Image (spheres, grey):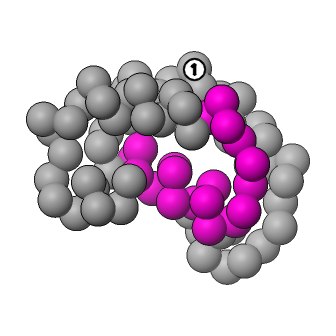
Amino acid sequence: WAFATASVEAPALFNAIAVVALKKLDGFTPQALANTAWAFATASVEAPALFNAIADAALKKLDKFNPQALANT
């Protein structure tokens, strides 16, 4: 999130985060899912597998999302 906010290009970091996040998304809170999607999108990092996995994880947790997390995702 911080790297995206600061407009810092760090493709190796984002790629490493994507690999690890794919394995742990089931444990992410709705806010963490939204923040991860936002960071990758804001940084213009192409990570289709991650975005698809975030979508799947979000669908499983829709009842736990508050309006802000839904809007951010």
Label 1 is placed on what type of residue? Lys
Q: Residue at x 75, y 48 (%)?
A: 46
Give percent across and percent down for residue 8.
78, 73
User: For mark 1, what is the residue?
Assistant: 23
Task: Left or right? Give the position of 16 relative to 51.
Answer: right
Instruction: Name the element at disc 1.
Output: helix
Vertical side of 26 occupied by 44: above or below: below
Instruction: Tell me where the magenta segment starts and ends, as one range.
Output: 32-50
Q: How many marks?
A: 1
Please state which of residues 60 and 18 is positioned toward the viewer in this rendering: 60
Task: Left or right? Give the position of 27 relative to 25.
Answer: left
Give percent across and percent down for residue 27.
38, 26
Give percent across and percent down for residue 36.
51, 50
Tell which residue pokes out farthest to the right in this image. Answer: 12
Q: Residue at x 30, y 30 (%)?
A: 59
Vertical side of 42 occupied by 48: above or below: above
One can see residue 46 in this view: yes
Asked if residue 39 is among those painted magenta in the image, a careful observer would answer: yes
Q: Main secondary structure of the magenta part?
A: helix
Give percent across and percent down for residue 38.
51, 60
One can see residue 21 in this view: no
Please state which of residues 62 and 18 is positioned toward the viewer in this rendering: 62
Asked if residue 45 is among those painted magenta in the image, a careful observer would answer: yes
Name the image quarter holding residue 58. top left
Q: Residue at x 51, y 51 (%)?
A: 37
Q: Residues within 10 Å of mark 1 (few under 14, many from 20)?
A: few
Vertical side of 7 occupied by 71: above or below: above
Name the image quarter holding residue 19. top right
Tell which residue pokes out farthest to the bottom in this image. Answer: 6
* Placement of the N terminus among the 4 image quadrants: bottom right
Q: Residue at x 47, y 35 (%)?
A: 54
